[in-house]
Amino acid sequence: MSDGRTTELPGRATINSIVVLPRTRTDTVVWGATQPTAPRACTGRRWPANEPERPLALHDSWLAVTAAGLLATLTLAAALWIAAHLDVDRQLHTVGLFVHLAALVLGFGGVLVADYLMLLWLAGRSTLAEALTGMSRLHIPIWAGLAGLIASGCVLEPNLDSPLTRIKMALILALTLNGLQAVILSRRLAQHVVAPLSARLLLWGATSGAISQICWWGAIGIGFWNAEH
């Protein structure tokens, strides 16, 4: 927008000057206005999800744990029958020994890490929720290691007439059953991540951890003794 003005100076010609005035803006800016958006279609999943969706667990009740315990007992009995009737050559024995040692590292290593996480919680260096989350991620390697130990043990020609070998098999069975009930224990503990733990849960957890360590170390010790003698 311009404003025409005429300026006259004495003794000089008339000078026309043009002054440019700023134009006033007629539009306004509204901060924080909510813009309408079209509704998003529900696809049933968000990617990436805030928390991974957890599938239904197999061991949700004591009845399921009992059924799984019977299945584990039958599996161990079948492994012993195979070990007693299988003819193993030297090459297969070497492969089985390698798998046995690798499974021991996988399974027992996972158990040690899980116990370490619980010790961190008892020492006040982590929360119970953090300890349980870390332990839940160790279930697969622990069970895979235990299954590998049983499967590879079939080709290691165990002396089933030895009392120590029978004690070792009993320890492995107790270890398996203890691991099955520990799944329910972890679920009970997960329900008390905020509320104080009862003395019953603390005793349950301590007993389960002690049984696990006794069975693992006992089976390892007997296996080492049998290998040397």
Image (cartoon, grey):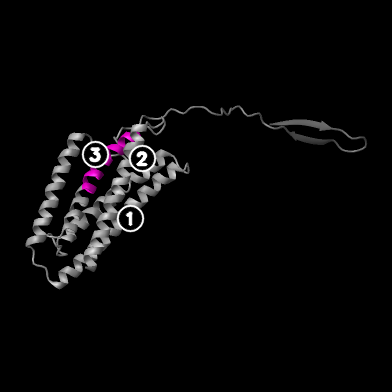
Left or right: 67 with respect to 24? Answer: left
Q: Is 74 drawn above or below residue 5 in the view shown? A: below
Of labels 2 and 3, earlier in sequence is 2
Name the spot of residue 68 as percent of width and height, x first.
Answer: 17, 42
Residue 220 magenta-highlighted: no
**Which quadrant would residue 190 be assigned to in this image?**
top left
Residue position marked by numbered label 2 in the rendering: 49
Task: Work out how far the residue at label 1 is from the one at label 2, CA to CA, in angstroms.
Answer: 30 Å
Badge 1 density bin: few <14, some 14–19, many ≥20, Cα 10 Å: some
Residue position marked by numbered label 1 in the rendering: 109
Q: Which structural element holds mark 3?
A: loop
Badge 1 amino acid:
Gly
Q: Which residues are magenta?
A: 174-190
Badge 3 density bin: few <14, some 14–19, many ≥20, Cα 10 Å: few
Q: Which structural element holds mark 1?
A: helix
Q: Is 40 drawn above or below residue 209 in the view shown? A: above
Q: Residue furthest bottom?
A: 90
Of labels 1 and 3, earlier in sequence is 3
Tell me, for residue 221, which label it has, or none. none
